[in-house]
Amino acid sequence: MLSNYLCEINPSVLTDFDQLIVVGDIHGDYESFQKIRSQFNPEKSYLIFLGDYADRGDRGVEVISGVQYLIRKFSNVIALKGNHEAYKDGQPTFTPCDLIHEANAKKNGWIEYYNNELKSFINQLYLAAVIPETALFLHGGISRRIRYLKDLRQPSKQTEIDVLWSDPFEGYGEYPNSRGIGVLFGRDISKNVCLRLDVKRIIRSHQPRKAKDKAHIEHCKRVITISSTTIYGGTPFILKLPTKHLDKAFDNIESFTEHLR
Ligand SMILES: [Mn+2]
């Protein structure tokens, strides 16, 4: 159980920091994680991770313990849940789960790792974060089910699945996702959800192949996909945006893309 699904970021707290750093999928790429850490200044940065910390790359255990350390130590670091953090009774709801093999090789076996480390990590993850009038942050996407902020504060099981698994497509309407879970959402869905939740854009990850070298912008600039992993090649990056001119910075995102190589 997540103790709190939606992290509502107070804009006046945010402007206590110089920059907002947003991190996409890491997928066990510990080298990229270390570079992200070196970009983070606890006094000056507010840091948001968008999920998918492990699997695919071979150092998910290390990435998770690094993120765990940051969210425990700093109130200005928050981490969202990705579909690779979705487990039910110690069983992954996705395949393949490389973290099981990693935990068996590096720790005292999967069950112990899950119960003693992973579970408490997952319990600290939010499903989404919002900066009022500015941006909604989540791992995968949205659906018609999201009509009010309360749908994210108290999400139904299906809404949670939509957020973790969905992808945007360049059309209109909403269709079943070819992943077999979540939806494909069109530009009209993005427009409506942004209007109803009073944000200008949605920042997400979940498709690192689409954002190998730079942010992928679609749906009339309302949907921005980022990636912070080398697992599919390309140059991983983070967003590093000035908190005082956040809206302007989001509209000029290339200038605030910080490559990690
Ligand atoms: Mn994902």
Image: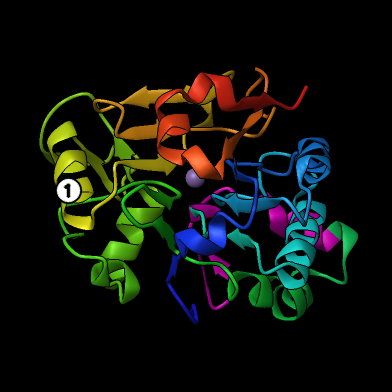
Tell me if residue 130 comes above or below residue 225 in the rendering. below
Residue 74 appears in which quarter of the rendering? Answer: bottom right
Query: From which residue to which does the magenta span run?
Result: 83-104
Tell me if residue 250 comes above or below residue 107 in the rendering. above
Mark 1, other Cα within 10 Å: few <14 / some 14–19 / many ≥20: some
Q: Position of residue 27 (x, y in %)?
A: 66, 42
Who is closer to the viewer here, 23 or 160? 23
- Label 1, secondary structure: give it: helix
Q: Residue at x 33, y 38 (%)?
A: 167
Who is closer to the viewer here, 65 or 113? 65
Tell me if residue 155 comes above or below residue 224 in the rendering. below
Who is closer to the viewer here, 248 or 258? 248
Residue 125 appears in which quarter of the rendering? Answer: bottom right
Q: Residue at x 16, y 60 (%)?
A: 147
In the picture of the structure, the residue carrying the numbered disc 1 is: 195
Q: Residue at x 65, y 29 (%)?
A: 237
Q: Position of residue 232 (x, y in %)?
A: 63, 24
Number of numbered discs on residues: 1
Q: Residue at x 46, y 77 (%)?
A: 4
Q: Position of residue 11 (x, y in %)?
A: 46, 59
The three-letter amino acid code for the residue at tag 1 is Leu
